[in-house]
Image: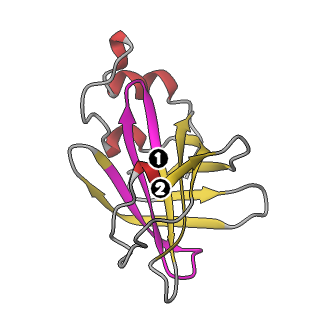
């Protein structure tokens, strides 16, 4: 994977010509070959009831804002079929493949670096790319989940 400067190219491809993205504009082609930073702005604090399956969606209300969220390096392969997330030099690295897309989100299933898997999802919120990193557990469907912004 390589680092590339995609800021304006990606923004234009996502429909930011007037400062506002097109609805449901996130597409893997706009992320392919790019290098970004995932800044955690919200952390999951648990849910009531707790998720029963890893596929259970967490509500926005289940997350609390944080001022000291982690920063992750996010690099997409040239074809957009793989993503690599690293919390810092020498830190834990997660690799995601098995891309799933719909008209709202791009989602990678984490297949390396986690105990029981997880996912990394990306969607647009106005003029911002938002993301969620969720890690699954062994015996517990979800052990950790964060949300934040994806920036070049």
Q: Nearer the viewer, residue 11 or 115?
A: 115
Q: Report the predominant secondary structure element of the magenta stretch.
A: strand
Which residue is the site of mark 2? 62
Residue 16: x and y in percent read: 36, 19
Q: CA distance from mark 1 to mark 2?
A: 15 Å
Residue range highlighted in magenta:
106-131
Q: Nearer the viewer, residue 141 or 99?
A: 141
Relative to 2, 50 lies left or right: left
Q: In the image, is residue 27 above or below residue 22?
A: below
Q: Quadrant of the C terminus?
A: top right
Residue 85: x and y in percent read: 59, 57
Residue 78 seen in the figure = no
Which residue is the site of mark 1? 131
Residue 22: x and y in percent read: 26, 25
- Secondary element at tag 1: strand
Q: Quadrant of residue 94?
A: bottom right
> Nearer the N terminus, badge 1 or badge 2?
2
Determine the residue positioned at 47% across, 21% down. 8
Determine the residue positioned at 34% across, 18% down. 20
């Amino acid at each position: 994977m390589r680092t590339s400067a995609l800021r304006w190219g990606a923004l234009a491809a996502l429909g930011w010509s007037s400062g506002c993205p097109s609805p449901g504009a996130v597409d893997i082609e706009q992320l392919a070959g790019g290098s970004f930073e995932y800044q955690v702005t919200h952390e999951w604090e648990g849910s009531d009831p707790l998720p029963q399956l890893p596929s259970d969606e967490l509500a926005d209300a289940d997350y609390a804002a944080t001022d000291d969220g982690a920063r992750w390096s996010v690099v997409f392969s040239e074809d957009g079929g793989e993503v690599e997330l690293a919390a810092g030099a020498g830190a834990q690295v997660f690799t995601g493949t098995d891309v799933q897309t719909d008209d709202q989100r791009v989602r990678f299933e984490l297949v390396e670096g986690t105990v029981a898997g997880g996912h990394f999802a990306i969607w647009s919120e106005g003029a911002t790319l938002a993301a969620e990193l969720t890690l699954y557990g062994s015996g517990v469907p979800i052990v950790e989940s964060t949300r934040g912004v994806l920036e070049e």
